[in-house]
Amino acid sequence: MLFKEERFTLKGHEIELRSAKDEDAQILIDGLIEVCGETDFLLAYKDEIDLTIEDEIKFIHGNNKSEGDGLVMAFVDGEYAGNASFNSNGRRRRFAHRGSIGIALKLRFTGLGLGPIMLERILEKMKECGLEQAELDVFATNARAIHVYEKLGFRECGRIPKAAKYDDGTYADEVHMVRSLIS
Ligand SMILES: CC(C)(COP(=O)(O)OP(=O)(O)OC[C@H]1O[C@@H](n2cnc3c(N)ncnc32)[C@H](O)[C@@H]1OP(=O)(O)O)[C@@H](O)C(=O)NCCC(=O)NCCS
């Protein structure tokens, strides 16, 4: 699904939201490596990101052309800040009404209020696709993200203890959250 390109001002910053283009492939890969190196709250260590430009272009096309997937990139004052995405569980009819969300902003662009705006756009797009339920997984230690998700109407529906194990031997539980897309 393609997102409508939009520009607005947020706390004195020029924001642009739009779908990805082929020429964004390297920016997306570099952004993922950067953000994975900055936070413990994502799925991978930065040294585990081994995407090629070809992989990323395929991923961009998949998101833009699919009826049940989408990715929106955010730029702050012209600089790539992060992205939010959704994927429907569309391969089996019994599960096709559900979709999963992901979001990651570079550390220096967090705290601006951008994440919730991007998530609103994702939720709108999921409704447009006919999805009925949005879901996401978040580490229990990620209090900021959980706060944002709860503000947007997500509720915890379960957790996996010790879902992630860090290189230093510590663990994080994973919280599964859900939000209805039909009123
Ligand atoms: C999580 C994320 C998407 C939130 O987006 P954001 O634009 O930074 O969020 P906001 O600026 O709107 O605000 C954060 C809110 O959390 C609150 N907050 C900040 N730190 C917090 C903490 N430690 N505990 C609880 N609330 C916290 C802020 O007070 C603010 O609340 P308010 O809207 O009620 O005033 C973004 O920070 C991010 O991408 N982080 C890095 C990657 C990540 O964690 N991704 C999610 C993986 S599941």
Image (spheres, grey):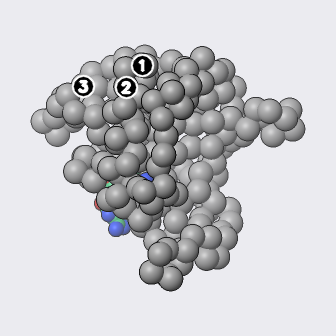
- Confirm or deny contact between disc 2 and disc 1 (CB under 8 A): yes
Secondary structure type for disc 3: strand
Category of crowding for the residue at label 2, using alpha-carbon neighbours closer than 10 angstroms: few (below 14), some (14–19), many (at least 20): some
Residue 148, located in which quarter of the rendered image?
A: bottom left
Question: Up-down: is 110 above or below 27?
Answer: below
Q: Residue at x 12, y 36 (%)?
A: 12
Relative depth, front residue between 170 and 56 = 56
Q: Amino acid at mark 3?
A: Phe
Q: Amino acid at mark 2?
A: Asp
Beta carbon at label 3 within 8 Å of ligand 1: no
The CA distance from mark 2 to mark 3 is 21 Å
Relative depth, front residue between 40 and 140 = 40
Residue 168, located in which quarter of the rendered image?
A: bottom left
Q: First in sequence: mark 3 or mark 1? A: 3
Mark in front: 2 vs 3:
2
Q: Amino acid at mark 1?
A: Lys
For label 1, the residue is 21
Measuring from the top left, give residue 33's x and y in whole percent. 37, 49
For label 2, the residue is 24
Secondary structure type for disc 1: loop
Q: Quadrant of the C terminus?
A: top right
Q: Quadrant of ligand 1?
A: bottom left
For label 3, the residue is 8
Beta carbon at label 2 within 8 Å of ligand 1: no
Measuring from the top left, give residue 79's x and y in whole percent. 22, 33
- Confirm or deny contact between disc 2 and disc 3 (CB under 8 A): no
Beta carbon at label 1 within 8 Å of ligand 1: no
Q: Residue at x 68, y 66 (%)?
A: 158
Measuring from the top left, give residue 136's x and y in whole percent. 59, 51
Residue 22 makes an appearance in the image: yes
Residue 183 makes an appearance in the image: no
Category of crowding for the residue at label 3, using alpha-carbon neighbours closer than 10 angstroms: few (below 14), some (14–19), many (at least 20): few
